Amino acid sequence: MNSWKSILLGACAPILLAACATVPAPPPAAPQVAPPPAVEAPKPKPKFGTFGFDVAGMDTAVAPGDDFFAHANGEWVKTTEIPADRGNATTFTALIEAAGVRTRAIIEDTAKAQAPEGSDARKIGDYYASFMDQAAIEAAGLQPLKPELDRIAAIKTRADLSRELGEGLRADVDALNATDFQTDRLFGLWVAEDMNDTSTYRPYLMQGGLWMPDREYYLGDTPRFKDLRAKYQDHIAKMLTLAGYDDASRRAARVLALETAMAKAHWSVDATSDVAKANTVWTRAELATRAPGLDWTAYLTAAGLADQPRFGAWQASAISGLAKLVGDQPITAWKDYLAFHAVERGAPYMGQALVDEHFAFNGTALSGTPQQRERWKRGVDNTSLALGEAVGKIYAERHFSPDAKAQVQGMVKNLLVAFDARVDRLDWMSPQTKARAKEKLANFRVGVGYPDKWRDYSALRIVRGDAYGNWERGSLFEYRRNVAKLGRPVDRDEWYLLPQDVNALNMPMQNMIIFPAAILEPTFFDPNADAAVNYGAIGGVIGHEIVHGFDDIGALFDPKGNLRNWWTPADMAQFKARGAALARQYSTYEPLPGLHLNGEQVLGENIADLAGLATAYDAYHLSLRGAAAPVIDGFTADQRFYFGWAQNYRSKYREAALRRAVLTGVHSPGMYRAQTVRNQDPWYGAFDVKADQGLYLAPADRVKIW
């Protein structure tokens, strides 16, 4: 466009010239030529392909109706090498690597700035620099571990043992998701809203004590598990030897025997997901009567929880079983166990010999990863773990624009409208239950990119040159921060993910979903991509998190986040029957010979995928506002939508990593998440799927829940 100034001058010039009568007339003016139209800056191209999908990564030799994952991603699978320091290559890991590079720049820039003593910036720089100072770490040797190992050596009585176990209690639940919980402490602590009254906090005790990923690793009778147990016992002995202990082989045998006894008490992954069963409340007095063996007074006093009147006992029988072991297993076995776990936990912050042996088992034996990640990557991860929101604040400022946030927020609104309409159309749900579902949906809160307020790290002491101590103090700071919530009003604005996390989260007791900045990147979200691809990709993720409020777990929580039934019995029976059909479908998948998915274990995530993708499809067509959907490069809008979904779940696994994901994970591996399209009616028309093709399901067999 022309500026206002040039327009005014051009219009006035002929008038001025005509007013001068005594001046000879000028020669005829040259014909006025209109200036060329302004050239708009070309729209930035999407990161992948011409419209946001990597067409070159397809394998068109595979029919979409036979294997949609391979059709959309097959060439990518063939040409992609799993990084030597990873157990898999996925869209998620690619974004994690990219976020790590960005976070490294933030941390190193901060370290160079010589910020004032005590500031968050100084703490970030000092934490990272301490971890990267290998010479200082080697010089310190085992000295940083000595205070804890000396306390363990001094244990003489069951009260001493209980006190040491309480001293080690930490709040280390991953992202407020009880089903993903894993800790090597005897118990873990989860401080969150009381499921029966979300206006208050409750401390939840949860099963722990195992170093290997799950009870099956201790109890499974396959050659693979037997071999891993032998390697684990050998690893325990090597770690204790490196820490200066004698008779390490005998000690290792005692540790493995004790952990095996713990595993027998543990609940399985799918049992842990049974929220109604797990929501057990014990009074302070009941801990001693229901879980004898542990000196609960000594334990809770050391843990700073002596004044708490009520506890959630998440896996009640496991807590009883673990407490019993404290009372009847030899104290010598417990001392060996505590010494090994202290060394194993601290190994990443110790000298190279311990670091290497730690990785040999945890990286290579357990997950098949041949090479340890570069030290700077581990330093970035550990710094983010300790000072995550301080780093995340800078990350959000640098890497998440207001325009991107507004675009995602607009998509969220469309998805909420679409899900509300889907509830209206359900032919199996009563008006009474529909009204409650819509009330719950109306109360949803959504966080995009970053929290509205940031965490205060002023009480966290970071000492330059003390890598192990910084980690230890960071872990204790996080524990105390969680315990300090007890007795205070519930903070509805707290986030449980960081802006630099490649993840998304539904918090059923807060009725809130969040999408950190780092997942709002291609392939999940590209502001320059075709809308159909974005709705299939990040729209499917947004829909997934919305539906988590209504999956087999989320559906148990009412509009205020309380664990309270809002369903008619007939509607709940229908809902469970449909979920059971989806579980049966996924249990037919066999990632490795003889190893099937456990459909019940992954049910919640698959319900979220199924209905979240369907909701995203509706939302995309709502976003068109009646306009015809364009065809791009020969692909229809519906095809591009489903390609966006499939591209989300590009995955390639090492065998050990895939086995671990199937046994311990609550998500189906990516290739099976992509195949949820077989339950979506529009997918059949979009790709002309025939009845004789591998993914085809007759209309009556397509699972529909929401």
Image: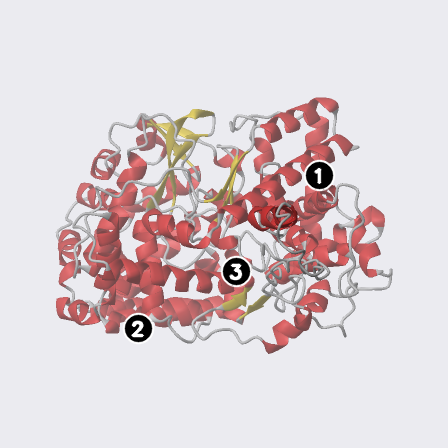
Q: Which quadrant would residue 299 be assigned to in this image?
A: top left
Task: Quickly name the residue at label 1.
Answer: 706
Q: Quadrant of residue 67?
A: bottom right
Q: Is residue 504 left or right of residue 412?
A: left
Location of residue 446 with respect to 472 vertically, above or below:
above
At mark 3, the secondary structure is helix
Residue that badge 2 annotates:
356
Q: Are marks 1 and 3 in contact (CB under 8 Å)?
A: no
Q: Amino acid at mark 1?
A: Trp
In this rendered view, identify the residue nearer to me: 647 or 409. Answer: 409
Q: Residues within 10 Å of mark 1 (few under 14, many from 20)?
A: many
Residue 555 figure quarter: top right
Quarter of the image with the C terminus is: top right
Could you give the CA–CA distance between mark 1 and mark 2, rounded to whole angstroms?
Answer: 49 Å
Sort mark 3 into few (<14), some (14-19) or many (20+) by Cα contacts within 10 Å. Answer: many
Q: Residue furthest top?
A: 432
The x and y percentages for residue 95 are: 49, 61
- The number of numbered badges drawn on the structure is 3
Mark earlier in primary sequence (2, 3): 3
Who comes first in sequence, dot 1 or dot 3? 3
SS label for mark 2: helix
Q: Residue at x 52, y 25 (%)?
A: 560
Please determine whether, in this image, residue 332 is positioned above or below residue 192: below
Left or right: 639 with respect to 455?
A: right
Cα–Cα gap, marks 1 and 3:
27 Å
Q: Where residue 4 sits in the image (x, y, percent)?
A: 58, 46
Q: Residue at x 32, y 58 (%)?
A: 382
Residue occupying the far front of the picture: 22
| Label 2, residues with CA under 10 Å away: few <14, some 14-19, many ≥20 | some
- Amino acid of disc 2: Asp
Query: In the rendered image, which residue does mark 3 sit on?
Result: 92
Nearest to viewer (mark 2 / mark 3)? 3
